[in-house]
Image: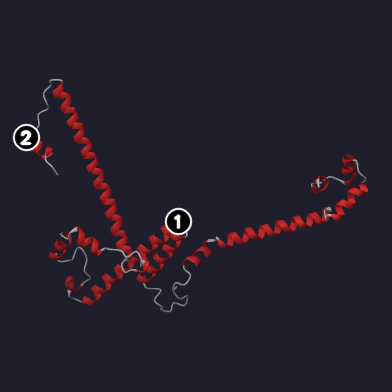
Amino acid sequence: MLILKEYREGATAPFLASKWRVSEHAVRRRITMHGATKREWGDSQAIAMATAREAELEEARRNSPEAVAARLFAGLPMPSDEGEVDGGEDPAALARMAMLASGRAMRGRLWAEARALGALAETYQRLAAREGEDSGAGASGSGGVRGAALTPETAPLALVHAILMMDAEAKSERFRMDPDAGEAQPDYTIKRAYWRDWKEKGDWLRGVAFRRQALEARVEALEAALIEAGLPLPEEHSARRAARLAED
């Protein structure tokens, strides 16, 4: 097999016959027997390269942005190319489509696509909210704010106060997410945003508490060192000191 290998790599039959001390006829007979002539070997190599190239092209086509988008949006209602109203042009419907596609991308570990589709969904949600406000304002006619869509700026103060005074349990229940429903549950994006903001706020508060505890421990250590050295403590207003040492 070494003779065949060297012949395929470019060695000539006379050279191989001399090197391996066999007749040139024996070399050529073995080459023909195993289909290792340069033409046959070249054809098989060309076929193998073409097959590998075709596989690479197929993989590239399968992973192209168009193919990925087709898989992410498969089965979802798409806007009509002729401009016919089929519900797909509604910003709220488009937001839902983008969010569903974002979820599919996340499950497929396509992180960049998931982030882009999530941002697109939020954009469509803002458009839907803006359309709702505009339609509410248009329906109100000359009624002013009274008939316009409710916003944080136009909501009655009593309602704003009631929302601010909601206890944690009531808010958690209102924004509760159904793990079985997933993205299909109502207000999924809003609920997810609430819990994301809640986590960020909790992380910030925990950081503040940690820094405060570390600072108090440092102050206590310094005061103990001053007392042990017989040095007076820095002057501090009694009310401020009482507030600093008070229990939370």
Residue type, mark 1 in image = Ala
**127 w.r.t. 201: above or below:** below
Callout 1: SS: helix
Query: Which residue is denoted by mark 2 in the rendering?
Result: 238
Taking the spot 78% from the left edge, 57% from the top edge, the residue there is 43
The image quarter containing residue 237 is top left
Q: Is residue 207 above or below residue 106?
A: above
Q: Residues within 10 Å of mark 1 (few under 14, many from 20)?
A: few
Along the line of sight, which residue is nearer the eye, 156 or 4? 4
Task: Write down the residue under mark 1.
Answer: 112
Image depth: mark 2 or mark 1 in front? 2
**Label 2: few (<14), some or many (≥20) within 10 Å?**
few
User: Where residue 169 sits in the image (x, y, percent)?
Assistant: 20, 60
Looking at the rendered structure, the kind of residue marked 2 is: Ser
Marks 2 and 1, how far apart at CA: 57 Å
- Residue drawn at x 24%, y 61% as measured from the top left: 172
Residue at the image position 59 percent from the left and 59 percent from the top: 60
